[in-house]
Amino acid sequence: MTLSFAQNAIALLIDLAERGEIDPWDVKVIDVIDRFLSQLKPAETVEAGRSPFEADLSVSGQAFLYASMLVLLKADNLARMEAEREMAEEAEELLEADLQDEEPLPLNLERRIRRRAVARPRESRRVTLQELIAQLELMATAVAESKPRKRSRRPRPHSRSQAVRSITQLAHQENLSEIAAVLEQFLAEYWELVSQGEEWMEFELLLERWVNSDAVELTRPSGHYSPQSDRVGVFWALLYLSAQSKVELSQQEFYRDLKVRSLAHLSEAELAKLLTAIALD
C-alpha cells in the first residue's frame, strides 16, 4: 500500500505539471498537499437523510505523514539557508572591520547610516518537481523497510495441574516455621555431635547431618519431598534463627561457603557480650 500511495502522489504531481497547474521549477509544497488531501474525500452517500463522510484511515494517515515530512524537508532547507546567510554576513562584517582598522572612520558617521525602509524579505527556496518526486520515493522506501512492532505475548492461563502445584508449594512454605522450630531443637541437642567439637561448621556439612537424622522426617510433608526443598528449608530456618540470635551465620565473600555457629549453649551473659561485640563491629 505504501508504494502505491507514493505512485499515486507522483502521478498527481506529473498530471498537475502537464496541465500547467504547477510550475515544475517552483512547486508550492503546501498547495500540492492540499490538492492531494482534497482528492481523498470520497463521494457522499445519502442514507436516512444523512451524508456520512467515509475515508480510508490508512491512506489519509500516510498522506499526513508524507505531508509533514515534506514540510520538514523544506523547513530544514530554509534553516540551512539562514545559517549560510548568517555566516556570510559575519564574514562580511569581519572584512569590513579589517578595512576600518586600516582607514580612519569618516566624520559624522551617523549621517552615513542608511536605514532600511522595509523589513528583510522572507527567505524562500524553490522546490523543483524532480526534488519532490525523489523525496516521495525515498520516504516510500523508508516506510516500506521499517520493521513492524513486535506484539507482546499474553501470558497463558495456568493449567489445573500447575495451579495445584502452586497451591502445594504455598502450603509447603507454611511449614517453614515448623522446620525452624525442629532445627532449633536439633542444634540444641546435637550441636556438639554434629560439629565434632568445632565452634563453626560448614552449611553443607550441617545439611548432610540434618538429612541423615530422624528429625528431618518431622518436617517433610508426605508426597512433596525433594533434596532441594531440604536445602531451602534449612537455609530459611537458619535465617529465621539468626534473626532471633539463636545461631550466627558467617560468609567471608559473596557466593562462598556459608558457616554456622549455634548460640544455644551460651549463657545470657555470654550471648549479650557476643551481640554487643557484633554491634560494635
Image: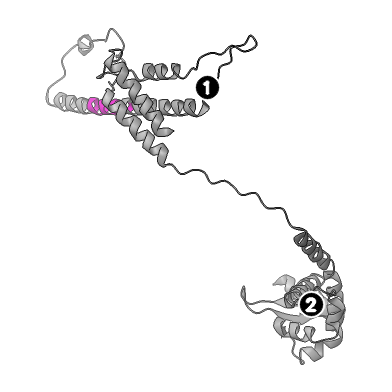
Q: What amino acid is labelled 2 in the image?
A: Val
Residue 69 seen in render: no
Pick out the residue farthest to the left.
103
Q: Which residue is mark 1?
A: 55
In the image, what residue occupies the spot 78% across and 83% down?
Answer: 211
- Above or below, 253 against 148 in this view is below
| Whole-percent x, y for residue 113 in the image | 22, 12
Left or right of 118? Residue 267 is right
Is 86 magenta? The answer is yes
The quarter of the picture where residue 171 lies is bottom right
Q: Quadrant of residue 44?
A: top right
Task: Provide the residue designation for mark 2.
Answer: 247
Q: Which mark is residue 34?
A: none
Picture coordinates of residue 78 (x, y %)?
Answer: 32, 25
Out of 47 and 64, give the one closest to the viewer: 47
Q: Horizontally, is 281 left or right of 129 in the view?
A: right
- Please provide the residue range marked out in magenta: 79-90
Which tag, 1 or 2, sits closer to the chain's start? 1
Judge by depth and name the residue closer to the eye, 114 or 237: 237
Q: Are marks 1 and 2 in contact (CB under 8 Å)?
A: no
Foreground pick, 91 / 40: 40
